Image (cartoon, rainbow, N blue to C red):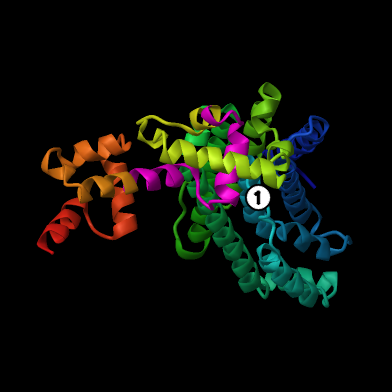
Amino acid sequence: MYFKLIDIIILSGAIQGLALSGYLVHKKANKYLIWIIFMTTIMLLGRGFYFHFRKTSLPFHFVFLPDALIFLFGPVIYFYTKSILGHSNFKKLYHYIPIIIYLITVAYVCQYTSKELVQMQYDGSLTLWYSLTEFGGIISGLIYISVSFFMIRSNRGLTSKRKKFKFLNAFIILMYADVILWLVTFLYRYFVSHRLFIDYNAIWLITPLTVHIIAYYAINSVKSIAPATKGDAAQLSNDNQLSKLKEELERLMKEEHVYKELNLTLDELASKLKTTSNRLSWLLNEVYHEGFNDFVNNYRLEAFLKSIEEGAHHKLTILGLANESGFNSKATFNKVFKNRLNTTPSNYIKSREAQ
């Protein structure tokens, strides 16, 4: 038995992952981030076990267990994003259907002895199953990471000024890069016949690198990966407090028209409400079922439509009215208008005047 350079890199990533998991547990960091790092570590150790002990008398069945974790990566990253953004009640059982299906197939495969499984490995009998498992894990990761990415974008007002949300944004982009590289290596192995600069080992190189980058953030700024404060949501669980905050929010929007402030952010709105941004974010997501940007832009769009009804477009340009309504970007205004009314502002005005 001997070790190559890649094995040393993977081993260092696994050791770093174990140490980092323990460190974050001690610092009471976000539990979902701890699980992501711990799962990465188990997969690295599983890879080492497979390549160095597959010819020994140890049960070959253990090789399949770490692979189950690839179906948990996506959901746990999604849970992590939700928890940082202050959402609750997001852990549904359907997120675990892929891993349950995989474990059922493992139970079927494990009816064979270790010796038979090793032989099936070498004669290619398990190739299709391996391929479907890996491809399923890639698709699962891409879907969940994409959903997490767009959730972050819909909460730009929340993420722009706070360090832990900047970390979240960087973390999701890093996970995207990880999964995309994984997809490239997968496609290369099955559809490219000539040798390229990238191979299957690339995914095992970037995984320890990911762990080390997270370790850097953890050591330098534990606060940036801290969990969302449970007290923020808990303090709103009282119906009276929730009602008062909701009433004050609607007063600010309908009477003071704070949405017309061009650079309004979640932090600034929370300050006007004399509450925290986490509590306001929780209120918007759980009561109004909208992110900050969608919530504010809906008020801005209603103000614009009201201006059109009053004939203000005869005195100001469309962009001028959009700015007066609170939109600070023509692109954002057009996108919101198109998504809501399925037409352009100019066509909307023409159709009204033609009636």
Overall secondary structure of the magenta section: helix
Residue type indicated by callout 1: Phe
Q: Residue 82 or 257: which is nearer the viewer?
A: 257
Q: Quadrant of residue 259?
A: top left
Q: 281 left or right of 258?
A: right
Q: Position of residue 146 (x, y in %)?
A: 50, 52
Residue positioned most to the top: 220
Q: 80 left or right of 117?
A: left
Q: Position of residue 30 (x, y in %)?
A: 72, 39
Q: Residues within 10 Å of mark 1 (few under 14, many from 20)?
A: many
Is 206 magenta? The answer is no
Residue drawn where x is 62% and y is 45% of the image = 243
Q: Which residue is mark 1?
A: 79
Task: Please provide the residue range marked out in magenta.
Answer: 272-301
- Asked if 218 appears above or below 196 in the picture, the reply is above
Q: Position of residue 85 (x, y in %)?
A: 60, 42
Mark 1 lies on a secondary structure that is helix
Where, quadrant-wise, is the C terminus in this rendering?
Answer: bottom left
Count the marks: how many? 1
Residue drawn where x is 46% and y is 43% of the image = 153
Q: Quadrant of residue 126?
A: bottom right
Q: Residue 335 or 109: which is nearer the viewer?
A: 335
Residue drawn where x is 15% and y is 61% of the image = 351
Is 281 magenta? The answer is yes
Residue 155 visible (yes or no): no
Residue 146 visible (yes or no): yes
Q: Position of residue 274 (x, y in %)?
A: 59, 28
Q: Residue 281 or 160: which is nearer the viewer?
A: 281
Residue drawn where x is 77% and y is 75% of the image = 109
